[in-house]
Amino acid sequence: MTPYDAPPAQATATNPLVGGQPLLDAFARRVSYLRVSVTDRCDLRCVYCMAERMVFLPKAEVLSLEELDRVASVFIGLGVRKLRLTGGEPLVRKGFMELVRGLSRHLHSGALQELTLTTNGTRLAHHAAELADLGVRRINVSLDTLKPDLFRTLTRGGDLAQVMAGLEAARAAGIQLKINTVALAQDNAAELPALIQWAHGEGMDLTLIETMPMGEIEADRTDQYLSLKTVRDELASYWTLEDLPLSTGGPARYVRIKETGGRLGLITPLSHNFCEACNRVRLTCTGTLHTCLGQDDATDLRAVMRAGGSDADLATAIRAAILGKPKGHDFHIGGAPSVARHMSTTGG
Ligand code: SAM
Ligand code: SF4
């Protein structure tokens, strides 16, 4: 039997993982959402995310597919209901579809409500139909421009046509799409209204993200930083923005744009404090659990697994980490990165 055939965690008297207390932190926030970075590698090199010559982790440091499945399954046993696979680029990880296939058993059992991914879309055309078959209903695709030349520049070599084909294939497979766009003062600021109009015209929500100071890159982030407050004020000068009460427990705030009929998300980690309702934690591809995107707190779950720890040991380590989840982050722009790890290691 492969790990992927393993039955879902069941609540039994002898299973310490389930049927116990929900995953609550010291501030009574319930953790129900896990993001897992399945690789630090990527086929693109977006200027705000990676250095041009990234040094990637040795394979031995990255969790195996079996370890990824195991640790995610323990989280699900502890009450995680939404699982997002990210990276790096999740679709470049060898065996990624097997991982999704394995984890989809938790969808079938009802333990997991949503299994989803964030991707740059370059390989989506090949995998969209299978992802849909496995129960993936929604996917976030990152896209910062609709101009092929600028796309090539921003991603240091990417081909926009591949992403467009990926979006088309996902749509054809019945997957709901959301576009994530990093707002960049120098590069796409003027294009943002056109991107929003395009996405809404295609029936996709779009979320704008402020650059976050994570990991050393060549560029100066102070130059790239564009406050979404400025963007919002500009959009509001010609569109009607209606605040939506929707809260996903994350840093996004949502508005409906009356004229396009679509939904716009605004992720403002630097200019808005979103921590009070935070419901999520992140696992790096090396098995380090970070309970806050903007702090350096870390728990090494790989060490627990590789030392021969049981699932109950993993569950104990996870509960302890979550009890220590910081109250909030303290990102700031300028100077050294607030957090030394790259977004591609932590998972966006
Ligand atoms: N490769 C996939 C992708 O691009 O969607 C998944 C991983 S990527 C790290 C996840 C998200 O993080 C992307 O939307 C990307 O634009 C965003 N991101 C990366 N570095 C960032 C940074 N320094 N500040 C803000 N967002 C960033
Ligand atoms: Fe790769 Fe995503 Fe980072 Fe771009 S944002 S370099 S696609 S991991």
Image (cartoon, rainbow, N blue to C red):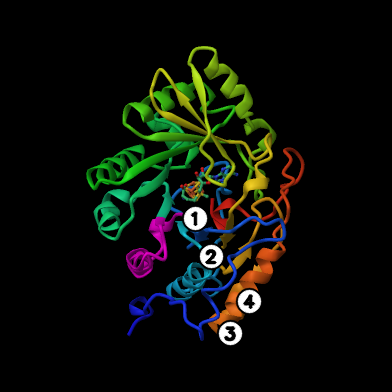
Mark 2 = which residue? Answer: 285
Q: Nearer the viewer, mark 2 or mark 3?
A: 3
Q: Are marks 2 and 1 in contact (CB under 8 Å)?
A: yes
What residue occupies the far right of the structure in this picture?
335
Alpha carbon separation for disc pair 1 and 3: 27 Å
Q: Quadrant of residue 66?
A: bottom left
- Mark 1: is the Cβ under 8 angstroms from ligand 2? yes
Question: In the image, which residues are magenta?
Answer: 86-115
Q: Which amino acid type corresponds to the residue marked 3 in the rendered image? A: Gly
Q: Tag 1's secondary structure?
A: loop
Q: Is residue 104 rendered magenta in the image?
A: yes
Position of 287 with respect to 195 (left or right) is: right
Q: Is residue 300 visible?
A: no
Q: Quadrant of residue 26?
A: bottom right
Alpha carbon separation for disc pair 4 and 1: 28 Å
Alpha carbon separation for disc pair 3 and 4: 10 Å
Q: Check residue 88 in the rendering and tell me which mark sits there, or answer none.
A: 1
Mark 3 = which residue? Answer: 309
- The correct choice, above or below, for 106 with respect to 224 in the image is below
Q: Quadrant of residue 220?
A: top right
Residue at (57, 69) in percent of width and height:
287
Spot occupied by residue 274 in the image (x, y as percentages of width and height): 65, 42
Position of 110 with respect to 339 (left or right) is: left
Query: Going from the N terminus, do you reach mark 2 or mark 3 first?
Result: 2
Q: Residues within 10 Å of mark 4 (few under 14, many from 20)?
A: some
Q: Which amino acid type corresponds to the residue marked 2 in the rendered image? A: Cys
Q: Residues within 10 Å of mark 1 (few under 14, many from 20)?
A: many
Query: Going from the N terminus, do you reach mark 2 or mark 1 first?
Result: 1
Query: Going from the N terminus, do you reach mark 1 or mark 3 first?
Result: 1
> Camera-side residue: 227 or 225?
227
Mark 4 = which residue? Answer: 316
Query: Going from the N terminus, do you reach mark 4 or mark 1 first?
Result: 1
